[in-house]
Each structure stands twice: as structure tokens, then as C-alpha cells.
């Protein structure tokens, strides 16, 4: 590696080591850094999802902007649902901290929200692009798999960047 790249990497490793020491003292720092980096990761993945939709529906003669709006809608829906799930978990800990029927009801509500996310996205994709069920299901599964892989890479990158910049 060139000297400037090696110096830069050494600085980053040193920063990460210092932050790991800080993390041992206060674990909340990492959570705060991670949560502050998640919106940026989703913002970066938004146009990537739109490109994936454009490639999946290449012969539909839709503009990239239309796919970007679908991707934005999908991200907004997922973010809102995840927010509702976090609020449900907070409410569950406050109202029903122990075992019991109310705690079980909150568990069912959370499971329904987890299940509703892919169902809603599938129905939205079917309605927006107007293809038959077999092609919609195939494209939904392929796009979903590719996006989950990208999201995994984004999460790892977010974790590493959070470790560096906390």
C-alpha cells in the first residue's frame, strides 16, 4: 500500500482501539452511534433499491423516478412499522413486564407486525407494477433476497463506522 493509505489505516485502527476502550466503560455509546448511523445507511440504500427495481422491471418503460418513489414508500413503510414495533415493545415493558395474557397479546401484536411487513410490500409491488402473481412473487423474492444481502453489508459497514466515529 502507498504510505498515505497505510497511515490513514493506522489512524483508523488506533481510533477504533480507543473507542473499544471507551465502549467498555460506557456501552451506551455504541448503541447511540449505531442508531445515528442507521438513517444514513437506509438513505444510501434507497437509490440502490430503485436501481434494482428498474432492472427487475426493465421492460415496463417506467422512469427511474417512479422506482425511486416506490423504494421511498417501501422504506417509509418499513421505518414506520419498526417504529410501531419499538413503541409496542416499550409499552409491553411498561404495562405487562411479567408473564401473563397481556404480555402474550403484545407478543402476538409484534408477530402480526413482523408478518404484515412482507405481505404489504408484496401487495404494493403487485399493485404498482401490475404483473401476474407468479412474476410478482419471483421478482419479490429475488429483490428481497438481494436487498437483505445489501442490508447485511450495510449493517456491517454501519457497525464498523459506528465503532470508528463514536
Image (cartoon, rainbow, N blue to C red):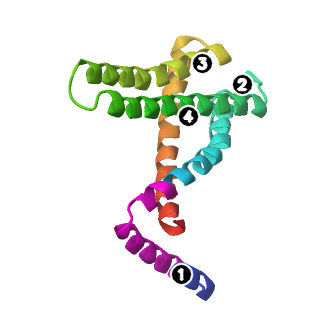
Question: If you read the primary sequence from the N terminus, does the residue marked by circle 4 or circle 2 appear first?
Answer: 2
Question: If you read the primary sequence from the N terminus, does the residue marked by circle 1 or circle 3 appear first?
Answer: 1
16 falls in the magenta region:
yes
Question: If you read the primary sequence from the N terminus, does the residue marked by circle 4 or circle 3 appear first?
Answer: 4
Judge whether 124 appears above or below 58 on screen.
above
Q: Nearer the viewer, mark 4 or mark 3?
A: 4
Q: Bounds of the magenta span?
A: 10-33
Q: Nearer the viewer, mark 4 or mark 1?
A: 4
21 falls in the magenta region:
yes
Residue name at image x 42 percent, y 58 percent? 28
Q: Which residue is mark 4?
A: 79
Residue name at image x 62 percent, y 85 percent? 4
Observer able to see residue 1: no
As rendered, which of 102 and 156 lies closer to the eye?
102
Picture coordinates of residue 161, whole percent (x, y): 52, 62
Picture coordinates of residue 117, whole percent (x, y): 48, 24
Determine whether, in the image, residue 114 is placed left or right of residue 77.
left
Picture coordinates of residue 85, whole percent (x, y): 44, 30
Q: Which residue is mark 3?
A: 124
Q: Nearer the viewer, mark 1 or mark 3?
A: 1
Q: Judging from the image, what secondary structure is the residue with disc 1 in?
A: helix
Q: Are marks 2 and 3 in contact (CB under 8 Å)?
A: no
Instruction: Give the quarter of the image for residue 71.
Output: top right
Question: If you read the primary sequence from the N terminus, does the residue marked by circle 2 or circle 1 appear first?
Answer: 1
Q: Which residue is mark 1?
A: 11
Task: Report the Cα–Cα distance between label 2 and label 3.
Answer: 19 Å
Q: Which residue is mark 2?
A: 59
Amino acid at each position: 500500500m502507498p504510505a498515505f493509505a497505510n497511515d490513514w489505516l493506522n489512524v483508523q485502527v488506533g481510533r477504533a482501539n480507543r473507542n473499544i476502550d471507551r465502549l467498555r466503560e460506557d456501552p451506551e455509546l455504541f448503541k447511540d452511534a449505531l442508531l445515528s448511523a442507521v438513517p444514513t445507511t437506509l438513505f444510501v440504500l434507497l437509490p440502490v433499491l430503485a436501481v434494482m427495481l428498474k432492472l427487475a422491471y426493465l421492460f415496463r418503460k417506467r422512469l427511474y423516478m417512479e422506482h425511486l418513489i416506490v423504494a421511498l414508500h417501501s422504506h417509509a413503510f418499513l421505518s414506520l412499522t419498526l417504529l410501531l414495533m419499538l413503541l409496542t415493545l416499550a409499552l409491553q415493558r411498561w404495562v405487562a413486564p411479567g408473564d401473563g395474557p397481556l404480555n402474550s397479546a403484545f407478543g402476538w401484536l409484534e408477530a402480526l407486525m413482523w408478518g404484515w411487513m412482507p405481505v404489504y410490500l408484496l401487495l404494493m409491488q403487485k399493485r404498482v407494477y401490475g404483473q401476474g402473481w407468479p412474476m410478482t412473487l419471483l421478482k419479490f423474492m429475488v429483490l428481497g433476497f438481494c436487498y437483505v444481502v445489501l442490508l447485511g453489508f450495510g449493517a456491517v459497514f454501519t457497525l464498523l463506522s459506528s465503532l470508528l466515529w463514536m
